[in-house]
Amino acid sequence: MEKADKPSFEKGILASQLPDRGMVEGQAGGEDVLLARLGDEFFAVGATCPHYGGPLVKGLIVGEELRCPLHHACFNLRTGEALRAPAFDPIPCWRVERVGDRVFIREKLSTQARKRPPLSTVQPPASVVIVGGGAAGLAGAEMLRREGYDGTVTVLSADGSAPCDRPNLSKEYLAGTAPEEWLPLRSPDFYAGQRIELVLNSRVSLLDVQRKRVQLENGKTYTFDALLLATGADPVRLPVAGATASQLYYLRTLADSRALVKEATSAKQVLLVGASFIALEVAASLRERGIAIHIVAPDPVPLEHIFGREIGRFFQQLHESHGVVFHLGETVARVDGRQATLSGGLELDADLLVLGVGVRPSVALAEQAGLQLNRGVLVDEYLETSASGIFAAGDIARWPDPYSGKPVRIEHWVVAERQGQVAARNILGRRERFEAVPFFWTRQYGVAVNYIGHAEKWDALEIDGSLEEKNCAVTYKLDGRTLALATIGRDLQSLTTEAAMEATVQGRNRRAAPR
């Protein structure tokens, strides 16, 4: 819709035009504004999500929350506050006035921080240390300040770059369609203004639970009253016979992506080892640069263990339609210079090899500290580890998933951010359960797939719609119960199913609460 076609809210619209929980987009003061109705109340907020610019009018209202259709960021309709990642910035608000049967949008309101309830019975920690400069670490630090915490906040990051938009490293940035200045999640001024000490190139080698201190590899120590462990995951590094270290590339950090971008300027053909999300996204991005791509993987179908055979075949055919060649059921036997020999004997030229065969949780520090582990760091429903005052979030955390009823560890960007936010509030004594339904997305050749829930196994897979037409919903069930949903071209259905799953968990908790 062009701006000229959008209604002018300054002239008012009939209240009867907007049903309860309905939304309409229009103009006020030359800006795009979303008008929403809840019963007899009307709210005017910014029309686009500050994360990736999603059109909020195509989203969903849940209670007093407005949820983005693209990546499920949540905003408070009354205040505009970003309640849950992946968005951190609020959306603007306008004053709304009803005169008779018409509703008018008046002046834009100043942004004001939401007032938090006092922590009268809880003494906040004097200092918080966050180990890890990824999604969970940054989200935790930002939430501490947003909650009004005034103590010392230190983020110790092994990376050489400030927290960045990691999903973009294998997508637009690698494809050359997004500049690097888009990548930082926050500017240097943010850390200074919020009094967050961000220490880069600093790997923690020792966590002393009893003395409440951490020590860096260079010997420097930091003491803490509370700690958030958010060390993330490391790429699985495979030995490839005959290959030198300079021939093998991985993608996890901004430095990794920069190295691939540099090589992409002259590479003609790239060999991708593995058919993971990262590998397929790298393949799509490099194809956009015109580079020939061969994918070698032992799997019979890409992503079959996550999506099932049908969607796995869909992704394979999508890549093949863009010229990618798959060598499934094979591995790289050896490399001689620019020539790679596959296990089946085929020889391929490759300017470089990119390995995308998964990641492993970085739990060495937690193990050294004696924290309880089980294929990750075990945490309770409040994301607290076996050591009081030490929390864990992100790729390392294995938590009791309230929907499936099982401990899970999930390597999703949005999950990590939301866990960082909840852990921060619990560091301050909020006692908030982590109940968010897991969510992730992938986008390849302009085709976006949203996935909510978590299904490690299923006995029924139901497809509604058409994969070929890129308009479908795929439901994963076990014993008749929906565990997960994958959608293509059905953002609203993804949101409504997510809300229904959350309501199930909240209802179960209300029934279990002591009376």
Image (cartoon, rainbow, N blue to C red):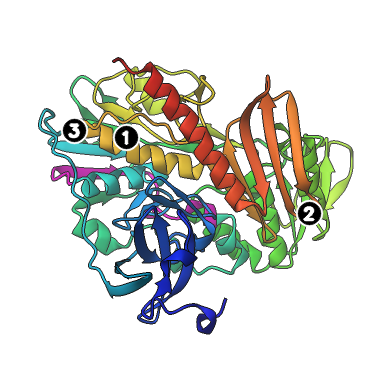
Q: Residues within 10 Å of mark 2 (few under 14, many from 20)?
A: some
* Left or right: 14, with 485 as reference point: left
- Can residue 412 be seen? yes
Most frequent secondary structure within the magenta stretch: loop
Q: Is residue 159 within the magenta segment? A: yes
Secondary structure of the residue carrying tag 3 is: loop
**Which corner quadrant of the image does residue 241 belong to?**
top right
Q: Residue 339 or 172: which is nearer the viewer?
A: 172
| Image quarter in which the C terminus is found | top left
How far apart are the two marked residues, 1 and 2, measured between alpha carbons? 39 Å
The label nearer to you, 3 versus 2, is 2
Residue under label 3: 224
Q: Amino acid at mark 2?
A: Leu
Q: Residue 495 or 256: which is nearer the viewer?
A: 495
Residue under label 2: 318
Residue 338 in percent (x, y) is at 76, 54
Q: Which residues are magenta?
A: 148-168
Point out the tag, 1 or 2, that comes first from the N-terminus: 2
Secondary structure of the residue carrying tag 2 is: helix
Residue at the far front in the pictured view: 100
Q: Residue 111 or 328: which is nearer the viewer?
A: 111
Q: Amino acid at mark 1?
A: Ala
- Can residue 411 be seen? no
Residue under label 1: 423
